[in-house]
Amino acid sequence: MSGLKEIGQRHGIPMLIQGPRGVFICEFIDKEVAYSPRDSVGADVEKRMKFASLMLDEGILIAPRGRWYVCTAITEADVDRTLECADRVMGRL
């Protein structure tokens, strides 16, 4: 989560990334926290969909509505590769 946030900041892309262990959401909106779905009103849905599509082109599947799932089968190498892909993709947004 922190890696994605750092990449977004480097590319000048505001992102809301939050959630419990094992699952989190990623929205393109300039907020630090959302307490309800109303707090996400104004998020750039088109950018989220383009990001998900470009990540899929890189071999990374993001669930609908910007959900990311993390499990114990994911290795540090998987995380590193995902962040590298996210960096490339955010450079294209």
Image (cartoon, rainbow, N blue to C red):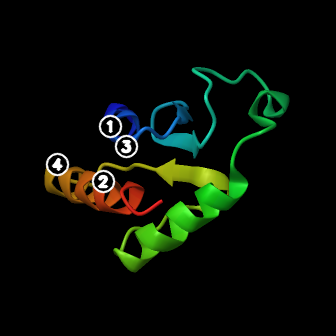
Say which element carries label 2: helix
Q: Position of residue 90 (x, y in %)?
A: 40, 55
Mark 2 or mark 3, earlier in chain:
3
Please state the horizontal and vertical placement of residue 12, each as a whole percent of the image: 43, 38
Separation of disc 4 and disc 1 at Cα?
Answer: 22 Å
- Whole-angstrom CA distance, mark 4 to mark 3, is 23 Å
In front: label 2 or label 3 = 3
In contact (CB < 8 Å): disc 2 and disc 3? yes
The circle drawn on residue 44 is: none
Q: Badge 2 local density, few (<14 within 10 Å), some, or many (20+)?
A: some
Q: Amino acid at mark 1?
A: Arg
Q: Give me the disc on residue 76.
A: 4
Q: Are marks 1 and 2 in contact (CB under 8 Å)?
A: yes
| CA–CA distance in space, label 4 to label 2 | 16 Å
Q: CA distance from mark 2 to mark 3?
A: 8 Å
Q: Residue at x 62, y 21 (%)?
A: 33
Q: Compare marks 1 and 2 and give the one earlier in the sequence.
A: 1
Q: Amino acid at mark 2?
A: Asp
Q: Amino acid at mark 3?
A: His
- Whole-percent x, y for residue 54 in the image: 46, 71
Q: CA distance from mark 1 to mark 2?
A: 9 Å
In the drawing, does residue 80 fall left or right of residue 91? Answer: left
Indicate which disc residue 10 carries: 1
User: Residue at horizontal 45%, vertical 41%?
Assistant: 22
Q: Amino acid at mark 4?
A: Glu
